[in-house]
Structure formats: C-alpha cells, structure tokens
Image (tube, helix red, strand yellow):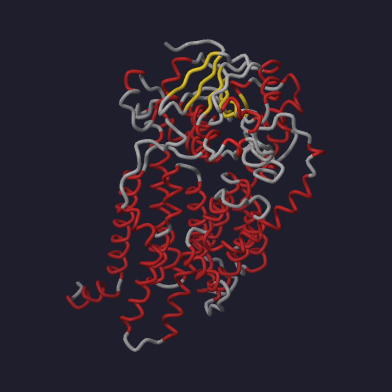
Amino acid sequence: MKSLQDWVYEVEAGSVRVWMVRLALLTMVVGLAGWIGLREFNGLRTMDAMDLAQQGRQLALGKGFTTRLIRPLALWQLRSKHGNQTPALADFPETLTPPLAPLVWAGVYRLGMIAKLIDFEVPQEKVKNFRVYSPDYVSLGMNLALIVLTAFMVFLWAARQFDLGAGVLATVFFLGSSALWDFAIQGGSECLVVFLYAFAGWMFCRGLVASDQDESEEVIPWGGVATFFSGFLLGLAPLVQFIQIWPVLAFGTLSLFVLRTHRWLLLFGLFLPLVFFLAWLGKMWATTGNPFGLNWAYFLADSAYYPGSLVWRTFSFDLEKTDVWRRVLGSVVKGLSMILQKGPELCGSSLVGALALVGLLHNFRKRSAAVGRTVWGLVALSLCLVLAFVIRGGDGAGTKILIALLPMVCVYGAAFLWIMIDRWKFQVELLGKLLACVVALFVCWPTLVRLALPEPPPFSYPPTYPPIFIFMRSWFETNEVQASDLPWAEAWYANAPSLWLPATREDFLKIHDRINPVFSILFTPVSSDVKMYSEMLNDNSEWKAWADLIRRQKPPDLPQAFATSLPPNNDYLLLSIQKRWN
C-alpha cells in the first residue's frame, strides 16, 4: 500500500501529475472548441466546404462519386474524351476532389439518416424562421472533434519526443492558431489533413523513441506497429488533398535511408493507401483522359491569363494557345517569393512558425529528435516547393495547404523555445516558465480576442444566403440544370445540378443549346461586388462578358427572359425560362 509521501510524489512528479495535466488539457480543448464553434458558426462558408458536403450527400444517397457542382472546364474535359457519350449533367462525375473526405462525410451522413438525425429536406413553412441548415452542423461537429483529437496527438507527440513541458506548450500553441479555428468553422477538409499529420507524427515519434531504447536489430513489436501506422496515416493525406502526394513521397524516400529499424514496415504502411490513390488516378484517366483529373487546372487558376475563377468557368479551352509552361514557371517564381515572405504565417502562426524554422536547424542530441527533425523538415520543404506552383497572392490557398504542418510546427517550435529558456539559465526557474507563458499568450492572442468579439450575423452573407436557395427548391424540377455565379451554394442548399456560369455567353449558349437546357441563371454579390462598374469592364475582369446583366440590364440574346430580384436587399437576380413564382 502506498504511503502518503508516495501519493504526494505521484501528484507532484509522477503518473498522477501526467494524467491531471492530460485531463486539464482535454477539458480546456473541449470547452474552447464548443465555445468557438457553437458561437461563431452560421453555416458553411466556402466553396470547398459546400462542394465537399454535396459530394458526401451524393454518396450517402447512393449516387456514387458524382457532383452537383458542374465546372465548365470539367465539362469540356469530359466531352473532349467522350464526345456525345459524356454523362448527363444530373449525374456528372467528380473529377477534382480525391475520394477520402467525401467518403468520411458520407459515412456520417448515412449514420445520421439511419438514426433519423439528419434530413436534407426543409419544409417550406420552416424557411421563414430558418437559421442554419441542419446538415451543416455535421461539418462543424466533425472538424471540432478532429481538433480535439489532434490537440491530444500534438501533446502526446511533444511529450514523448521531448518532455511534459514541451507537450503542454505545443498544445497551447496549436489551440492558439486562429487560422485553425477559421478552417474548422468554414467546414472544409483541412482539419482532417491536420489530424492525419499529427497522428502520423506521434506514431513516427513512438517508433523512433523505440529505436533509441534499443539500437540493435532486435524487433520491438510496438515500435514496429507505430512505424507502420505512421506511414499508413500520412499515406492517407493525398486521398484528401491531391498536392499532399509529393511530401508523402519525400517522407517515404527519406525514411528509407534514415531509419535503422522498421523501415520496411513504414514503407508497407505507406504503400497500402497509395494503392487506393493509384486506383483513383486510374479512374481519373479512364474518365477524363488525364490521371490528374481536373487538378492540373490549379496551375492556371487565378493567373494573369485566367484571373479569379475564369479557368474553371472556361468551356472553349485550347491548351496549345495557353502557353502553359511559361505561365507556370512565372507563377512558380512569384509563389516562391510569397512563401519566403509569409512562410511561417501560412503554417497557421507566425511566431510559432518562426520558432519551428529555427528549431529545425538545431542539432538535437537525441537521435530520435534529430531524425524526426530531418524527416519532417524535408516534408515541409517539399510541400512548400510544390505549393509554389499553385499559390496565388491574397487568396488564402497557401494557408489551406500549409496548415497541415501546424502540428509539426507546434512540436518543434515549443521544444526549441524550452531549449533556449534552459540555455539562458535563469537564476529563478519561475522566470523561464513566465517567459514561456508570455510567448504562449502572444501566440494565442488572436484566438483569445475572438472570444470577446460579438457574435457573427445569422448567415455568412455576403454572398451566401441559404434561405433563398432552400426556398427556390420549390421552383425547380428534379435534376433541372441551373447556372449561377455561386454554384456550390446552389448545389448544396437547393440540391440542384448547378453549372458554374461560363466565362462567355457564347460558351453558355453552347452548353444550353447543344448539351443540356439550363432553366435559370442566378447572380449574387459574388459577381456584383466590385467597387466600380469600370472594374467589371477591364480586360482582366472575370465577369466582363456578363457586366450588363449583372447591372440589371435585360439581355436580348438569352432564352432566360423572366427575371426577379430576391432578398436580401434584392442583391440576388434570378433569370429563368419560365415564371414559377408569384
């Protein structure tokens, strides 16, 4: 039986203290996630989130990997290969998004439908008092749960690799990233990628620590299992974000040379999900004639020749006249310059990113920490290099990709801060802990400030106003194709096949006359939100071809002759072939 002195030791420095710290962190994380999530959430906010949600719904309803968001460029690509045998727009195949995230969302939707907790239909009488589309909460709940789990993984990773203090500080750094909470509330798949990186990092760390304990070739079972799962988990990342395939390959290649034990287990774990990734590439090749599907368009998106979303809305696409490689190489130079300027900030936190950058140059004494630093440093470098091909200034694409590095950044940033505090050798130990608290407070300040901000408006407007899309369901026939400048919202909330409004009227009329009739065209503040009309008429404006219609001038050359303005503030303009409203 333990004495009182033994219990005091356990509380102050033993296992009880560790579990008390874990319980306190778990309580803090769950409370923070619930407060920020439920307080700030007002529905899905981004194209990626709504596109992912509607793909998950298609799978949950048994319609396969199809989409209700039809990009004209995807339509051009399929018709270039299949001609008149191209699938109907109502059952259009998804050729851009890898399959894992839609499958995860679909699984949750399906379980909710079986339990009768999720209903994609909204009765018309409830539209008046409508606040948040109930299936939107699935994306929020999943992202908040992933943040809680990831925070736990970050703590375990840092505590195992370094010590308990590094684990606590790394967790605080992680939760202090305001960008992370933004992605959680927006409802996309970024939190899933962050979770995979954190889980893989913890497993990789456990395998390395096991090899530290025994440098011989003797098999350490749990170390081998951890190493296997590190490869398997990171190998799932390309099935969520296509661009992650390059850092995953770098991870596997370097691990093959630096690991002393279990390297083949890691490669086997990495190989299993990559088999599914290769199968998806094969499916894209059979569907589109390109193994990348539509992902190659990221090289041209928001470039000088295709400003904004113009490349996705292009139906008459001529690859030979685009001069792809010259434009791509020019974009790479700009992308590298932007990453060098804003790299730490793009990882989710400027200060923590800077600490991690210096920490990755530090010569750690423990071999496991040094090997981890080398491997994860190369992963970060490879991700930054491939990101330079697609990043564009001011569109947030960099943060969306590099946020995956946040767990690693927090672990090595926290470790380096404690190393520096230890080297400064404060005469009073409390001063070092106080300095760490000050740095943590500075890192977490943007997140703490948002706790005191007033609640957001009931809807993420402009541009998305969900009640209108749900109300318009009664005007549309089943599988009737619509066109919009906000097609992801129409596809998700109105559950209608929605064509992203083509770049030119000629392209629109080709689709309408030769492929599939388009019943309506919806304009929202996405296209009309410019400071001056002259900006819309500029040669590099993505909405130049539709400027007169956006200004509410009735066009003579479109069959959608019936028009009505819709709330809020008559900012929505709907044109249709028939008048189905009172």
- Placement of 307 over or under 249, stated as above or below: above
User: At 44% across and 38% down in the image, what residue appears?
Assistant: 44
Judged left or right of residue 233, residue 569 is left
Q: Is residue 337 above or below residue 276?
A: below
Q: Is residue 326 visible?
A: yes
Answer left or right for 126 relative to 511.
Answer: left
The C terminus lies in which quarter of the figure?
A: top left
Q: Is residue 215 above or below residue 268?
A: below
Res 68 visible: no
Q: Quadrant of residue 73?
A: top right
Q: Residue at x 38, y 37 (%)?
A: 137
x and y percentages locating residue 317 in the rendered image: 75, 33
In the rendering, at what x and y percent does residue 393 appear?
A: 60, 52
Q: Position of residue 49 (x, y in %)?
A: 49, 39
Which image quadrant is residue 550 in?
Answer: top right
Q: Nearer the viewer, residue 540 or 508?
A: 540
Q: Residue drawn at (53%, 80%), measured in percent from left and top?
A: 365
In the displayed image of the protein, which residue is found farthest to the left? 4
Please say if 406 is above or below 188.
below
- 502 sits to left or right of 471: right
Dividing the picture into quadrants, the one containing residue 254 is bottom right
